[in-house]
Every structure is written in structure tokens, then in C-alpha cells.
Amino acid sequence: MRLSQFQELMADEFGEVHASVLLNDLVLLPLGEKTGQAALDAGEDPRDVWLAICAAMDVPKDRWHGKPQKNKKPN
């Protein structure tokens, strides 16, 4: 996952302000008791950070790959 995708998922799920707070303040035990930002700064894959945040925040598993797009046209 690219960092831009990670940032988009965070903003989509939590809103930009809350996403920023979570990224900087929420300590993620599975990532060595680091915040999401510290884990990213240490080179952790953004996907792993995203999944750890989803688990910590009880995001429903059906949204771990992003919220469904209501206006998305089928292929």
C-alpha cells in the first residue's frame, strides 16, 4: 500500500482531524508499542499500520479495505 492510499483510507474512515490525532497519539501494541506515525517513520508498511489501527479502533472488517463506494459503477 502506498502512503497516499493509507492517508486516504484514514481520512475516509475517521475524518482528517481525527485521523491525524489517531496517527500521532494511538499506541499500537502489534507494532512494537509505537504510534502509527512512529511506525511509518521507522519504515513500517502503511498497510500494516492501517490494519493495526483498524483493529485497535474496532473498525468493522468489511471496511478494512476502505468504505464501499456508493456511486461506483460496476465494470
Image (spheres, rainbow, N blue to C red):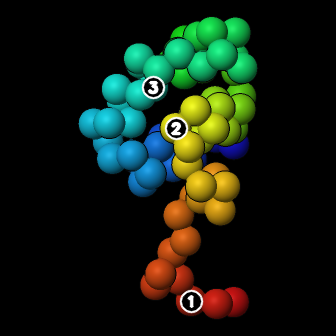
| Secondary element at image label 1 | loop
Q: Which mark is residue 50?
A: none
Mark 2 residue type: Met
Sequence-earlier tag: 2 or 1: 2
- Give whichever of 62, 6 is nearer the camera: 62
Residue 18 horizontal/vertical position (percent): 32, 36
Residue 43 horizontal/vertical position (percent): 68, 16
Q: Which mark is residue 23?
A: 3
Left/right of residue 31 with respect to residue 5 in the rendered view = right
- The residue drawn where x is 71% and y is 32% is 48
Q: Quadrant of residue 32?
A: top right
Above or below: residue 22 compared with residue 9 = above
Sequence-earlier tag: 3 or 1: 3
Q: Which residue is mark 2?
A: 57
- The residue drawn where x is 46% and y is 84% is 71
Sequence-earlier tag: 2 or 3: 3
- The residue drawn where x is 44% and y is 51% is 13
Q: Quadrant of residue 46?
A: top right
User: What crowding class fits label 2: few (fewer than 14 Cα within 10 Å), some (14-19), or many (20 or more)?
Assistant: few
Mark 1 residue type: Lys
Mark 3 residue type: Leu
| Secondary element at image label 2 | loop
- The residue drawn where x is 53% and y is 15% is 27
- Give the residue furthest to the left: 17
Residue 57 horizontal/vertical position (percent): 52, 38
- Pointers 2 and 3 in contact (C-beta within 8 Å): no
For the N terminus, the quadrant is top right
Q: Which residue is mark 1?
A: 73
